[in-house]
Amino acid sequence: MKKSALLLLFGAILFACSNKKGIPDVSGIKVEIPIERFDRTFFATDTSKLEMGLQRLRQQHPDFYYDFMRQILGVNGSFADPTTLIVVKEFIRGYSSIYDSLKPKYNNLSWLQKELQKAFQFVKYYFPQYKTGKAVLFVGPFDAPGVATTASGLAIGLQQFAGKDFSVYQTAEAQELFPLYISRRFSPEYITANCMKAVALDLFPDQSGGKPLIEQMVEKGKQWYLLDKFLPRTPDSIKTGYTALQLKWCKENEGLIWSEIVRNEDLNSLSPAVIQTYIGEGPFTQGFSQEYSPGNLGQWLGWQIIKKFVSKNPDMKPEEVMKTPARKIMDEAKYKPR
């Protein structure tokens, strides 16, 4: 009896801690995210019988076939089109070794399916009307998207998740596309977070372009706020793409970072150069520590402003927060970190 009482007490404590974090129980929400292996079918195509192989490919993957051909390979996908046949044949020859290198890493995908299904349970909790679908895995050119939303769900390009030490990422040609501060995030543990970023943008497309610096910071911060809702137990380093040291530096210097930007910049600036300094990829943020500051520091600050606003409006639903104008959020948050 005593043992049972202790177990019940321990369970109550865990439940209370979970509630304090504001993480809802989504275990009762039914979600299925089938994983479709377009990559396997594609690279099994016999290039000596390419027309027949492409017909089989379209039959097995009707939802994704033309997306891949038109959006990724840049051809029309017709079995009788000479350009399609030439491009597909050359791509299979050129990328078969890449696919072969990825096969062992992505042979068993039960972990990914579990991660995606759990994340989509949270998506459905907050946005019940959101239509979930399947996850289609492909291998495309290195400049093809790592993740994209499609009419049938998500498309995941494994060429951008080979692991940070993948030899191709180290080449001069690859680093022109993806410097090491970007390619270090090309690892499997980032797939689900990138998928949820795509879902967040699908729900609330980024309309910050052309707005003043501060509004863009807040609008970008909304995306990470929503990511927090979909991935409440995922480390911030995975969600933001910052290193643990960069996150630590941000948290320890939040007040200094904000005061320096306020002192040196016009928060209402429309200058592309100023906006690019604080929003967008970079090895560090100009004007701050090259060793510890991350690029895209403006989005992190916008995220903190959103958190401050939400703390003052705890009853607001995520959809309401996402639809609240950036100016209103800034005015009500009264963000003044120390």
Image (tube, rainbow, N blue to C red):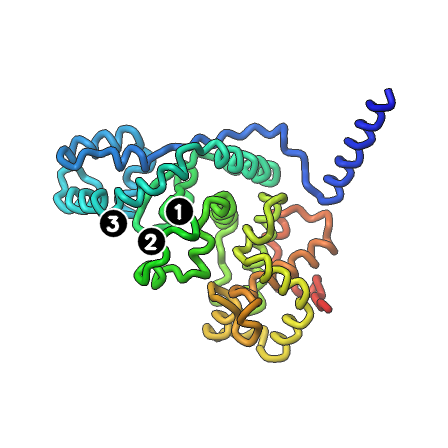
Mark 2 vs mark 3, CA separation in Å: 23 Å
Q: Residues within 10 Å of mark 2 (few under 14, many from 20)?
A: some
Front in this rendered view, residue 326 or 187: 187
On the question of residue 27 being in view, the answer is: yes
Looking at the rendered image, the disc whose residue lies closer to the viewer, 3 or 1, is 1
Circle 2 — which element?
helix
Label 3 sits on what residue type?
Answer: Gly
> Does 103 appear above or below 166?
above
Which residue is located at x 36 percent, y 41 percent?
A: 102
Q: Earlier in the sequence, mark 2 or mark 3?
A: 3
Which residue is located at x 71 percent, y 68 percent?
A: 336
Using residue 273 as the reference point, say whether residue 168 is left or right of it: left
Please report contact status of discs 2 and 1: CB closer than 8 Å, yes or no: yes
**Which residue position holds label 2?**
168
Q: Residue 225 in the image: state x and y as whole percent.
A: 61, 52
Label 2 sits on what residue type?
Answer: Val
Q: Residues within 10 Å of mark 3 (few under 14, many from 20)?
A: some
Total count of labels: 3
Circle 3 — which element?
loop
**Which residue position holds label 3?**
74
Which residue is located at x 35 percent, y 37 percent?
A: 103
**Which residue position holds label 1?**
162
